[in-house]
């Protein structure tokens, strides 16, 4: 691990109060040594101290609030904004648990093209919603229904981008990820392009170098890449997304050698029966639990997507994978919340840089 990665780990990884040496191995040993009670105290201390200067510690830029976002943005103009979103998300996920990972994926796809600006929600020919990358996205109707309720109570006030950010946070807490306080004031973008979505959204076959460049260009870190990839501990993927690894990987006429033969055989049998539209769980062991199963699976060569499995052998991400595989689930859930908070504040539009749409599915006309 190079110095930059070590600095990122020391600044971001949720074991900052543990005395650290310069070796990742000692960090792993320290994590294992933390008892359950100590872990709970550590999490509480981190939540209390998050975003504040500590002795000998200065916030890096990517941990500071984005300019134009405020915690009390809707306190006067729409005081029940968060309550409306939370109740709707909770009810929807109670009826369909697969909506939790679907909302996280919708949030990430929106982030991938210009930050969280609700551009993925626009429903018009040529918009991001019509890109190949967006083909299996879900959750649009839920966001639109929340917007309609907010328009009835707080007209022309709450942006779709803020709704999406709050919905992703509340979907995360429904799967036991730590709650994180949100800053609001995002504006909705006035542009949405399917060409941009197909160019920028990672599709599961990129190199680690490409993924790191994608994250760093948006103000996030290598650790964020490793942690946010852990969203694949819940949810599903289509057989079409996995198919290139199963029969003729990279034109070799053989399966991807980096995949466990036994796991590959299971996937081939399942997808042969289900077809391209069939679904397979991203985490074969605990697909509905937000835990460290995703990282444990990578150690067993059972990463479903090609980009997942590539994280382990790469020197820039592999040590993070091994640390996370050995970490307690509650610590992973805390770090995931921290990375999601940064993702939601990266490259956002504020002030007059965007608009507040009347409908999330349509960019406003010039009359508003």
Image (spheres, grey):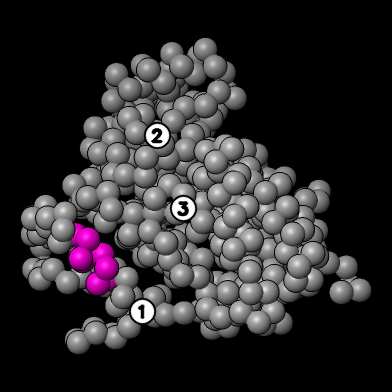
Residue at image position (26%, 56%) is 331
Q: Residue 246's quadrant in the figure?
A: top left
According to the image, label 3 marks what residue?
A: 172
The answer to whether residue 257 is magenta is no
Coordinates of residue 265 in the picture (x, y in percent): 36, 16
Coordinates of residue 44 in the picture (x, y in percent): 27, 68
Hey, which residue is sitting farthest right in the picture? 367
According to the image, label 2 marks what residue?
A: 287
Disc sitting over residue 51 in the figure? 1
Real-space CA distance between mark 3 and mark 1, rounded to the nearest whole angstrom: 21 Å
Q: Are marks 2 and 3 in contact (CB under 8 Å)?
A: no
Q: Does 89 sit above or below residue 243?
A: below
Res. 189 in view: no
The first of marks 1 and 2 along the sequence is: 1
Label 2: which secondary element: loop
Residue at image position (77%, 58%) is 148
Residue at image position (57%, 37%) is 96
Real-space CA distance between mark 2 and mark 3, rounded to the nearest whole angstrom: 15 Å
Residue at image position (46%, 16%) is 270
In this rendering, position of residue 222 left or right of residue 94: left
Coordinates of residue 202 in the picture (x, y in percent): 51, 49
Mark 2 packing: few (<14 Cα in 10 Å), some, or many (20+)? some
């Amino acid at each position: 691990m190079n110095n930059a990665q070590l600095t990122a780990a020391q600044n971001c990884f949720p074991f900052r109060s543990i005395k650290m040496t310069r070796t990742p191995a000692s960090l792993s040993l320290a994590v294992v040594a933390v008892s359950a009670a100590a872990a709970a105290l550590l999490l509480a201390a981190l939540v209390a101290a998050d975003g504040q200067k500590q002795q000998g510690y200065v916030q890096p830029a990517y941990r500071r609030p984005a300019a134009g976002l405020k915690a009390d943005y809707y306190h006067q103009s729409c005081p029940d904004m968060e309550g409306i979103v939370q109740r709707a998300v909770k009810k929807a996920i109670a009826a369909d648990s697969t909506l939790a990972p679907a909302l996280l994926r919708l949030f990430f796809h929106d982030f991938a093209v210009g930050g969280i600006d609700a551009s993925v929600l626009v429903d018009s020919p040529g918009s991001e919603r019509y890109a190949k990358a967006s083909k299996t996205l879900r959750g649009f109707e839920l966001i639109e229904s929340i917007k309609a309720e907010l328009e009835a109570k707080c007209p022309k006030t709450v942006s779709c981008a803020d709704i999406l950010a709050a919905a992703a946070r509340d979907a995360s807490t429904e799967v036991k990820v730590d709650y994180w306080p949100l800053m609001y004031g995002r504006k909705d973008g006035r542009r949405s392009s399917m060409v941009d979505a197909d160019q920028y959204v990672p599709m599961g076959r990129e190199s680690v170098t490409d993924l790191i460049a994608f994250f760093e260009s948006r103000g996030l870190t290598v650790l964020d890449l490793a942690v946010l990839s852990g969203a694949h501990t819940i949810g599903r993927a289509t057989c079409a997304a996995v198919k290139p690894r199963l029969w003729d990987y990279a034109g070799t006429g053989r399966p991807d050698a980096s995949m466990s033969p036994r796991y590959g055989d299971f996937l081939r049998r399942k997808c042969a029966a289900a077809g391209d539209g069939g679904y397979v769980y991203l985490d074969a062991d605990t697909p509905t639990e937000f835990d460290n199963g995703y990282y444990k699976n990578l150690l067993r060569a059972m990463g479903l997507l090609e980009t997942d499995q590539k994280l382990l052998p790469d020197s820039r991400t592999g040590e993070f994978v091994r640390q996370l595989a050995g970490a307690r689930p509650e610590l992973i859930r805390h770090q995931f919340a921290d990375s999601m908070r940064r993702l939601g504040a990266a490259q956002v539009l504020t002030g007059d840089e965007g608009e507040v749409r009347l409908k999330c599915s349509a960019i406003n006309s010039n009359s508003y």
